[in-house]
Amino acid sequence: MTSLRLAHCSDPHLHFAAPPPRLSERLSKRGLSRSSWARGRGQLQRPEILAQALADLRAQGPDHILVSGDLVNFSLPGEFEQAARWLATLGSPQALSVIPGNHDALVPVPAVQGLDHWLPWMQGDAPGADAFPYVRVRGGVALIGLSSALPTAPGLAGGRLGVAQLQRLESLLADLKAQGLCRVITLHHPPAEGVVPERKALWDRAGFRAVLARQGAELVLHGHSRDSRFDPLPGPAGLILNLGLPSVSAIPNPKDEGARWQLLEFSGAPGHWQLRVTVRAYSRALAGFETAGRYRLKLNT
Ligand SMILES: [Fe+2]
């Protein structure tokens, strides 16, 4: 029997007190991003909302927590260290899984100064397994973490999974199905068509969808889009659920739907999985979180 209560949140965009950029950095992608943050984006990502969201999430007592990228903003080495400390407060590597987003690879950063800090939360169960895709099995659910994060030119926020990752994903999906596991894929960028402008999109989304169409999956989760999404994708046995979340720390504004997270409760047995979704949203009126939706879904396999 499958039984897992999974809390999913995305795009926390942790605040970080950094010294002002050097003159030589001002026109770099990181410098431009820091200017944009100072001009207003930083005011929309609120640490107090994030703290409320996490308290609300913990109160539900999930078995596992999933954070789908954009933990930091500028890919500064100090941000990766701070985010690792934040992850350690959120959950043990056994109980918390993370994937990176575009802000976590804003510019090239040596791994040892960057994403290596989060490896305990980004490694598969198998010893020595490749970082991506990683597979972690919890309560009969196979959590498959992908990375679409890569440095891009100024003005771009897109991502790419790459041929090698897609090939490994294809064989993994077949193996995990044969093991009778409920396959949940997480990536940062939305894989459906037309969800975000092309400059922010998953550039090899057609390749990802082709893998899904051949091998199937029970659920796809993503962040990045700044609104709640339900964009089913074609699979071999019908439509595959594909759910996206806005930032877990955003105050509602014209560009952001406002902070949300979701509790995903898996039950059933292979071929007969059920998913109960509870969406918790920040309310300005309450200055806190409330249930924005609750529904049961049958997972196609
Ligand atoms: Fe993003």
Image (cartoon, grey):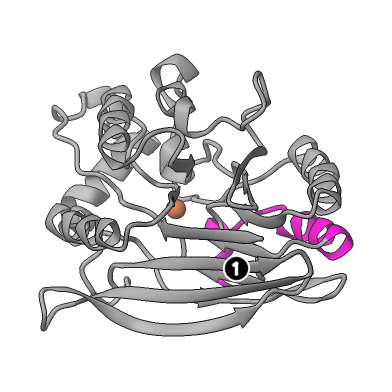
Give SS at disc 1: strand
The image shows residue 211 at horizontal and vertical percentages of 83, 56
Picture coordinates of residue 166, whole percent (x, y):
78, 44
Quadrant of the rendered image containing residue 258: bottom left
- Residue receiving disc 1: 267
Q: What residue type is labelled 1?
A: Ser
Queried whether the magenta region covers residue 194, the answer comes back as: yes
Q: Is residue 120 left or right of residue 143?
A: left
Residue 197, x across and y down, in percent:
54, 66
Q: Position of residue 292 (x, y in %)?
A: 33, 83
- In front: 81, or 159? 81
Please give left or right for residue 61 compared with residue 175 in the image: left
Q: Image height check: is 126 above or below 203?
A: above
Q: Is residue 223 visible?
A: no
The residue that appears at 52% across and 33% down in the rendered structure is 122
Residue interval drawn in magenta: 193-215
Residue at 53% across, 40% down: 152
- Does the stretch in magenta take in 89? no
Reply above or below: 247 against 126.
below
Quadrant that contains the N terminus: bottom right
The residue positioned 25% from the left and 55% from the top of the image is 54
